[in-house]
Amino acid sequence: MERQVLGKEAVVNSSAKGGPLPLVLTREYIAQSWPLILPFTLTSFTPPPPTTTSTTTMREGLDLPEFGYLPFDHFVIANWDTASPLSQNEQKRILVEKWIALGKYGRNPKHFALATFADPIIDDIPVGVPQDLLSEDDRALNSMLSTTLWIRTWFGDPKDKSQEAADTAYARLRKTVLQQGRENYHISYIPKEFVFEDRQELSADAQRGGDVIRGVAAGCAGSVPGYLVAALMHCPELFEGMSDDDWRHFTGEERAEELAESDRVQSALVLVADRKACEEGWVLVLAVNHRGEILPFRVRERAKDTAQIAVNWLQGQPLSEVADDEDEDVEFYLGGGDGWE
């Protein structure tokens, strides 16, 4: 692969390793492999029915897990501090941060995930433990099959008129990437439910030091950015979902090997609409592991080509496929010149 390294940035030829996969997927492939891609065939994982009264209701065609049906619910019950002076939302954020940091096996013990699969019904919920930390929409979200997130981090300076300019720039970016330049349209491989752009929720993280600097997302390898935590407060089950896969039952050496590999493997794709993306058209693309940590290889892609990366990820191609060295701590530009070209 030919690339030019400029400090911590690099420009690479996007045709490396055989070039990107075609943007258009066949209907047969989508129907067989990725039912989520087609809006009219949206499906979700349905856990095995419990032996007693059903604990799910339906919300617009999606399974809606009641409290106790998600592993995160069990974590909340085990860790909620009813005497804490923090607000409910502040304490929720702390729990989500801890939940993410546990990693896949930390979230898997018999009193969290495995217990949920065996029997999702909780007979005794301690007094004072909130059951509404996740809204109905959030609970529906945790039943969906997607590991691609779109997060807006640039909102302008709240002290001046730059907010209006930021909104205008973001609208252009959003239409280019998520709507493919069309009106009343949204690409299905970055589901609307996984688009996080609420100013009130995300602007505080955008103003914090290390994650976003002067509006530009830093993307520091090994970090768990605050804006990702804010998004995961809506979908704490994003990384493993509700599937009882074989790895959950690994022990000893097999488990140690699998865990060591998981720390270096992409578990989710995060597309960041920061200031550089909004103003220059270069979208930041991050691969994160099962702990929410940013992997070393990072990408800046042109706005019109960003959706292709989401398609590639759906087809099983991790971001590292276009890297010479996936462990190199560097930000790649997939091309040069104007990000709006």
Image (spheres, rainbow, N blue to C red):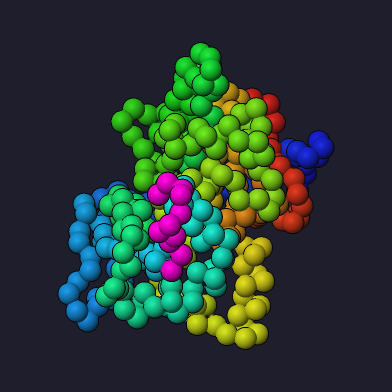
Q: Quadrant of residue 209?
A: top right
Provide the residue span drawn in magenta. Answer: 78-88
Q: What is the residue that sits farthest to the top in this orientation?
A: 161
Q: What is the residue that sits farthest to the bottom in this orientation?
A: 252
Q: How many marks?
A: 0
**Image quarter (top left, top right, bottom left or bottom right) of the C terminus:** top right
Most foreground residue, 321 or 287: 287
Instruction: Please indicate whether residue 136 sits to the left or right of residue 316 in the image.
Output: left
Q: Is residue 83 magenta?
A: yes
- Residue 236 appears in the figure: no
Give the percent coordinates (x, y) of residue 218.
67, 39
Q: At x 42% / y 54%, what residue is drawn?
A: 235
Give the percent coordinates (x, y) of residue 202.
48, 36
Q: Is residue 275 magenta?
A: no
Q: At x 70% / y 41%, what residue is drawn?
A: 332
Q: At x 66% / y 32%, what residue is drawn?
A: 213
